[in-house]
Image (cartoon, coloured by chain):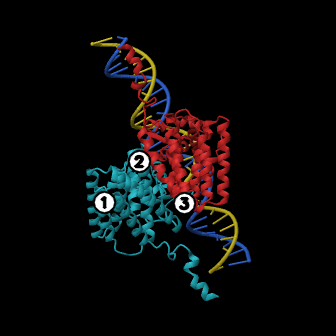
Chain colours: A red, B cyan, C yellow, D blue
Amino acid sequence: MSDLSSSVEAEGKSGSMPQDDIVYAHIFDAILERRLPPGTKLNEEALGDIFSVSRTIIRRALLRLSHEQVVVIRPNRGAVVASPSVEEAKQVFIARHTLEDAITKLAVENATTKQINHLRKLIVAENVATKQGDLGKAIRLSGEFHLKLAEMSGNAPLFNFQRSLVSLSSLIIAQYEVATSTHCVLDEHSGLLDAIEAKDTEQACLLMREHLQHIESKLNLDGETVSSDLHVVFSNVLNKKS
Amino acid sequence: MSDLSSSVEAEGKSGSMPQDDIVYAHIFDAILERRLPPGTKLNEEALGDIFSVSRTIIRRALLRLSHEQVVVIRPNRGAVVASPSVEEAKQVFIARHTLEDAITKLAVENATTKQINHLRKLIVAENVATKQGDLGKAIRLSGEFHLKLAEMSGNAPLFNFQRSLVSLSSLIIAQYEVATSTHCVLDEHSGLLDAIEAKDTEQACLLMREHLQHIESKLNLDGETVSSDLHVVFSNVLNKKS
DNA sequence: TTGGCATTATGTGTATACAATATGATGGAA
DNA sequence: TTCCATCATATTGTATACACATAATGCCAA
């Protein structure tokens, strides 16, 4: 069972009920860890049985997730885990570049020693998860790193937006990342944190830009479609027949 | 009765029900036009009577508004129109500077003639509203201008975030703006749009920065508290006693 | 009066019943 | 077989009933 460390404790602003938050956090983490892959149907009654609550609660959680664009609610046809298109994925990363740059600058100004130490622990945990082969957990912890960075910025609106962007990024990575070693990302987080601790804004922003570009470079966004376009996938079959 | 032009048509992503949207849009506009000032209690049953729907629908609308931080839901105590603190207000404007800069750059790249013409109409409408003394409508239309700009950027995540920031800004202006003439703002919108149409990124970003600074300069954020901190308000009384 | 406590009333939180809609199956006709 | 219509089933959308928490009222005692 997951430890929920991320979503639950990061709970801040809008006064919602604990029950909601628990359901929300569980679904959220499951999506980020890819136990619920993009496109998965989210049946309200089934979820209600699982969490022993009524559909009312489930619907609230799904509504919140849909506001964060992590879940898509199709009228009369239920909710599914979002599966961002290539175009949407590109937009998300453009937005992230903007946000992360601002967040990094603010984080350099406002970071406390305590927060930095917490982030160091996160990096270690992510490292462990990766070595243990728990890729889902590694992705979630990586997202948490960026979310905590936003928290360090001390800017609530930016933090809220970052939450949405980070979750979407996780979905995008789940959909579009080509098989590769993810070790380098760990070092990047570490170096980035060093720059922030040293209050070197220039360096921190530079490293952040590079970091995001590395993540993007591992995605198959510009190239050919992977599995969405059936015509491309089965083009060889058609060739045989002709 | 308000024309709802803004929120209703700007409805895009998450598939929600038309009924929801109507209620949401009405409340949203009422808040932006300050017919529902910050702090106003939003009674679920009363709203249900007004819109002839059950509390279920009202609650969904309020939940959405609370996700956008425009409404605050206090557990067991109902929803009220948000009344941002000075600190929160400052954060909102920091976030806006970041977002608007990115949006402006993208808008210069992607703006179509049709969209620019639409914005010109908005400016005219805002002008008319101001001259007619309908300050509430003027504020809402001004917000719509910035929201449409975000739409022009072609970036959905930035657009969604901008929606939240613009509504919060309206609340902040409602709370903190000192009495003054707002005419200059109109010309600023116009000039900004000219720069975007001319594809002059540098100029457009410069004008946007100045525009935001002008708005901020009209707010009473740095100075003394108006009514929130009772200790400050009644400090003279305490002095008398001592 | 004034302060504290019990009671009442109002309004929110959750579950559930019912209605509306989409999905999948069945069967017949071309 | 293939296509279409019809029906059966499952799932979502909405309203409502009840449980519960908070706020308001009134009472009594000091």
Q: How many labels does the image show?
A: 3
Which quarter of the rendering shows the C terminus of chain A? top left
Chain letter, disc 3 residue: A
Q: Residues within 10 Å of mark 1 (few under 14, many from 20)?
A: some
Looking at the image, residue D18 sits to the left or right of residue B95; the answer is right
What residue lies at 51% left-to-right and 50% top-to-bottom? A209
3 and 1 marks on the same chain: no
Dot 2: within a 10 Å radius of its alpha carbon, few (fewer than 14), some, or many (20 or more) residues? Answer: some
Tell which subunit mark 1 falls on: B
| Residue A25 in view (yes/no) | no
Question: Residue A72, position in %: x, y?
Answer: 46, 40
- Helix, strand or loop at mark 3: helix
| Residue A48 occupies quadrant | top right
Left or right for A171, reference B51:
right
Question: Disc 3 marks which residue?
Answer: A106
Mark positioned earlier in the residue sequence (2 or 1)? 2
User: Any mark on residue A216, and which?
Assistant: none
Q: Residues within 10 Å of mark 3 (few under 14, many from 20)?
A: many
Q: Which residue is the site of mark 1? A: B195
- Does dot 1 land on a helix, a strand or a loop? helix
Q: Which mark is residue B156?
A: 2
Q: Are marks 3 and 1 in contact (CB under 8 Å)?
A: no
Q: Where is residue A84 in the image (x, y as percent from the top left)?
A: 45, 39
> Is B96 in front, or is B67?
B96
Give the amino acid type for the residue marked by disc 1 in the picture.
Ala
Q: How far across and down, in percent of the image, does residue C28 sit?
A: 34, 13
Q: In this view, does B150 lie above or below B131?
A: above
How far apart in space, not on screen, are marks 3 and 2 (Cα)? Answer: 24 Å
At a point 38% along the width and 67% down the height, the residue shown is B210
